[in-house]
Image: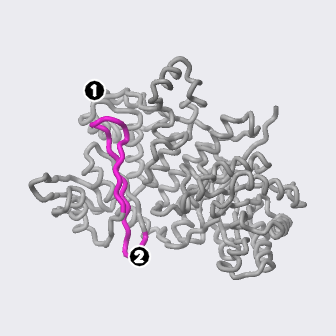
């Protein structure tokens, strides 16, 4: 039986970055974009070009380097937005402009303060203008699931006639339930007279936890593009988790009868990269990519699983790039062993990169008996992060005194961008507080630590610890930092410095733009 192709539209770099507390540098966006290309998504929504200079630069650079995916920029139905999006996409081999406008009565009245006729006129002009620049134009009526169906049909027919090649139905506030949403897609496909000229897309938010279910219901009713984010990132409760949508379609292809060009073995690496760069740890029982997704603890389950894996696993872990915790390396391993294992994991490092990683590997091996694949990936990510991010401040050394009979005190040595060593010390309510206060004495910007979390990368008392920290500057902008080390206090210092470096870099490149995000 022939299966129709389904387009996977990734908006991790646009809607995903609108997650509260998120904020990526241009280089970090480039890292993710390259991995999304390896994953095999069809469309990368690289950003909202008009929102800030940093977003414009990110869209422009991604458009230039990505060759195997369409690259899209979001734009409101405003001339300046369309012009800026087109300018950012000039070097794209396959560009798309994605324009949107509110369509529900509540949005038109309270947000847009426009009547329906004005909304249609704005939408048609925007699509026509975008069509002047690119052949591929997507149009979204924001808050479509709370929009009058007759008005929605009229609006979509007009934008298709103006040149839209994809019409996207966003459940902007996560209001829909699955049968209702599926039925609405079916009704639109039946009622819109020129629907055969376009691809029908959906963009589902997860406010009621139904984003994936709604997306799959839309596929059942003829939608042929799904929009979402890796790990379900996005505004409020997030978007449809693309890894869940993709594997739902893959495992149940007998039911959905569609195919994608996604390389599912890259799902795990993509999920981990996004989690690390965003600084959002993954819940252990997260479907497809969580640490417990392929673990079996019940005695009954284990017994059956050992007899036949298919009793309690509906997919092979390897199909989604899940490698578990294979113990392969230790402190006696050499460069050849490390390189061999890296090749097995899909990494091809040159000699300089290998030598740098080997030093970090040996440092970790001195404090850990065995190094797992997950440990290695944490080291690889840390190396790639520091390579892509300017080190305005780097940790040189740290010493902490603490205990239940003395006030914690930290002594810290930092190397600045001019390679000058700066010494600082401070007391605190705890060792991490003392470290952060010592760093505060060095930096010339005022920030407030708003969130702090610690996660174990692997199991065991000698596990590599990963710390995520969020800081807020005087403008109310939040920046995330992550750091990993067997010593949690050291990991905390790395994370704090990472967040500070990110805030400095994003401010310098113009990525800091409060309130510039666009919801759909």
At horizontal 76% and vertical 43% (from top left) the residue drawn is: 5
- Look at mark 2 in the image and give the residue it sits on: 475
Where is residue 409 shown, x and y percent of the image?
14, 58
Where is residue 437 shown, x and y percent of the image?
23, 65
> Is 263 colored magenta in this rendering?
no
Dividing the picture into quarters, in which one does residue 245 lie?
top right
Where is residue 21 shown, x and y percent of the image?
45, 63
**Which quarter of the rendering shows the N terminus?**
top right
Work out how far the residue at label 1 is from the one at label 2, CA to CA, in angstroms.
50 Å
In this view, 515 is above or below 222: below
At horizontal 58% and vertical 43% (from top left) the residue drawn is: 38
Q: Tell me the tag on residue 332.
A: 1
Q: Which residues are magenta?
A: 451-477
Mark closer to the chain start, 1 or 2? 1
How is this picture coloured?
one colour
Residue occupying the far top of the picture: 307
Viewed as shown, does residue 290 lie left or right of 118?
A: left
């Amino acid at each position: 039986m022939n299966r129709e192709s389904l387009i996977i539209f990734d908006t991790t770099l646009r809607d995903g970055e609108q997650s509260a507390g998120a904020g990526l540098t241009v280089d970090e966006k480039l890292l993710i974009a390259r991995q999304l290309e390896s994953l095999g998504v069809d469309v990368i929504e690289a950003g909202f070009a008009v929102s800030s200079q940093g977003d414009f630069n990110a869209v422009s650079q991604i458009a230039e380097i990505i060759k195997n995916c369409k690259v899209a920029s979001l734009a409101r139905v405003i001339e300046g937005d369309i012009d800026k999006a087109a300018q950012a996409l000039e070097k794209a081999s396959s560009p798309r402009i994605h324009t949107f406008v509110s369509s529900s009565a509540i949005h038109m009245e309270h947000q847009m303060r426009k009547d329906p006729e004005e909304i249609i006129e704005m939408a048609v002009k925007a699509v026509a203008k975008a069509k002047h620049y690119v052949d591929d134009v997507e149009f979204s009526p924001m808050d479509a699931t709370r929009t009058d169906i007759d008005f929605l049909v009229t609006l979509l027919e007009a934008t298709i006639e103006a040149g839209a090649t994809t019409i996207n139905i966003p459940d902007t506030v996560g209001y829909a339930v699955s049968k209702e949403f599926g039925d609405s897609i079916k009704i639109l496909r039946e009622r819109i007279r020129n629907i055969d000229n376009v691809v029908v897309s959906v963009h589902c938010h997860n406010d009621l936890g139904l984003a994936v279910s709604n997306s799959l219901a839309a596929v059942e009713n003829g939608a042929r593009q799904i929009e979402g984010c890796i790990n379900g990132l996005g505004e409020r409760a997030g978007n449809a988790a693309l890894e869940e949508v993709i594997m739902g379609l893959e495992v149940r292809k007998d039911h959905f009868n569609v195919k994608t060009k996604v390389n599912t073995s890259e799902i795990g690496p993509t999920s981990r990269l996004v989690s690390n760069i965003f600084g959002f740890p993954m819940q252990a029982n997260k479907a497809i990519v969580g640490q417990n997704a392929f673990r079996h603890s019940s005695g009954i389950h284990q017994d059956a699983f050992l007899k036949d894996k298919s009793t309690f696993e509906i997919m092979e872990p390897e199909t989604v790039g899940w490698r578990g915790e294979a113990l392969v390396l230790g402190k006696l391993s050499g460069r050849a062993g490390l390189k061999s294992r890296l090749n097995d994991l899909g990494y091809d490092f040159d000699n300089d990169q290998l030598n740098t990683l080997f030093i970090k590997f040996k440092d970790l091996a001195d404090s850990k008996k065995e190094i797992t694949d997950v440990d290695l990936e944490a080291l690889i990510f840390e190396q790639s992060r520091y390579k892509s991010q300017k080190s305005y401040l780097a940790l040189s050394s740290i010493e902490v005194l603490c205990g239940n009979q003395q006030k914690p005190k930290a002594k810290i040595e930092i190397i600045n961008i001019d390679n000058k060593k700066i010494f600082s010390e401070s007391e605190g309510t705890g060792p991490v507080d003392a470290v952060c206060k010592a760093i505060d004495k060095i930096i010339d910007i005022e920030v407030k630590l708003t969130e702090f979390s610690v996660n174990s990368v692997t199991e065991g008392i000698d596990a590599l610890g990963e710390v995520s920290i969020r800081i807020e500057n005087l403008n109310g902008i939040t920046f995330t930092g992550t750091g990993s080390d067997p010593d949690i206090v050291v990991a905390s210092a790395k994370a704090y410095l990472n967040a500070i470096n990110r805030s400095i870099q994003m401010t310098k490149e113009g990525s800091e733009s409060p309130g510039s995000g666009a919801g759909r």
